């Protein structure tokens, strides 16, 4: 059964802590796509495990919390066994060509983030490939719908307030200009030497006191 059993976890822990105890007679490497750093949710992720011997391989996933998951075992005759001793997986595909072992994540999701590596057993010794780290890119959180509605309402409120106010200010300015022009015209055409009635009366009173 493909599962994160205590025995599997112990063997993997020994491999991480003491890789030198297994010798160097088997060469393993993992290849990942060049655009792995631009991976998006829902895209397909394809990984390759290259070895110099045809002995079968495990694909292991270490999630972001550090928990280990045995995904699939591919034997030397290309038989595939997924977790739970299943022949098929809704999340993964696996295959083999010569000494290359393929793992495909059908539709990448945040839970598929973490490290991927392959493990091989040769002469009762485990050999680990270097890990490939896969991280989903962070995206800004969408603005809640009610906040967008509130922003639209504020925009229209500003229009209804400022447009009439600007029109009223324009009318006041025009009225002020007309008033100034009319005042200037009135002062221009007023008689300059007109004698006021009060001045004439005062002159007649002064004549009464002057003997002729």
Image: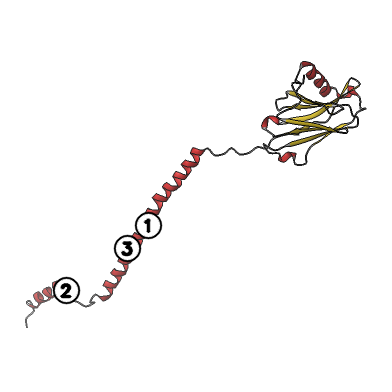
- Is mark 1 in CB contact (under 8 Å) with mark 3? no
Mark 1 or 3 closer to N-term? 1
- Residue 138 horizontal/vertical position (percent): 65, 37
Residue drawn at (50%, 41%), measured in percent from left and top? 148
Mark 2 or 3 closer to N-term? 3
Give the left or right position of residue 147, taking residue 91 as reference.
Answer: left
Q: How many marks?
A: 3
Looking at the rendering, in which quadrant would you find the N terminus? top right
| Quarter holding residue 24 | top right
Residue tagged 1: 167
Residue drawn at (44%, 44%), measured in percent from left and top? 153
Give the secondary structure at mark 2.
loop
Crowding at label 1, few (<14), some or many (≥20) Cα neighbours within 10 Å? few
The foreground one among 175 and 160 is: 160
Mark 1 or 2 closer to N-term? 1
Residue drawn at (81%, 34%), measured in percent from left and top? 48
- Residue 130 horizontal/vertical position (percent): 82, 31
Give the secondary structure at mark 1.
helix
The foreground one among 193 and 130 is: 130
Direction top: furthest residue: 6
- Residue 59 horizontal/vertical position (percent): 79, 27
């Amino acid at each position: 059964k493909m599962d994160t059993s205590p025995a599997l976890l112990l063997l993997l822990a020994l491999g991480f802590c003491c890789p030198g105890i297994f010798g160097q007679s088997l060469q393993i490497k993992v290849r990942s796509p060049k655009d792995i750093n631009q991976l998006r949710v829902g895209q397909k992720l394809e990984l390759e495990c290259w070895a110099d011997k045809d002995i079968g391989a495990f694909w292991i996933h270490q999630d972001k919390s550090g928990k280990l998951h045995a995904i699939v075992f591919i034997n030397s005759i290309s038989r595939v066994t997924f977790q739970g001793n299943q022949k098929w997986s809704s999340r993964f595909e696996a295959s083999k060509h010569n000494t290359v072992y393929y793992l495909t994540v059908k539709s990448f999701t945040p839970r598929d983030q973490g490290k991927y590596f392959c493990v091989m057993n040769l002469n009762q010794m485990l050999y680990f490939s270097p890990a490939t780290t896969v991280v989903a890119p962070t995206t800004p959180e969408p603005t809640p719908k009610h906040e967008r509605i509130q922003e639209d309402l504020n925009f229209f409120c500003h229009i209804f307030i400022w447009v009439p106010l600007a029109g009223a200010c324009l009318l006041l300015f025009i009225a002020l200009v007309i008033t100034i022009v009319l005042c200037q015209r009135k002062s221009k055409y007023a008689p300059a030497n007109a004698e006021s009635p009060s001045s004439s009366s005062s002159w007649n009173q002064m004549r009464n006191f002057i003997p002729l």
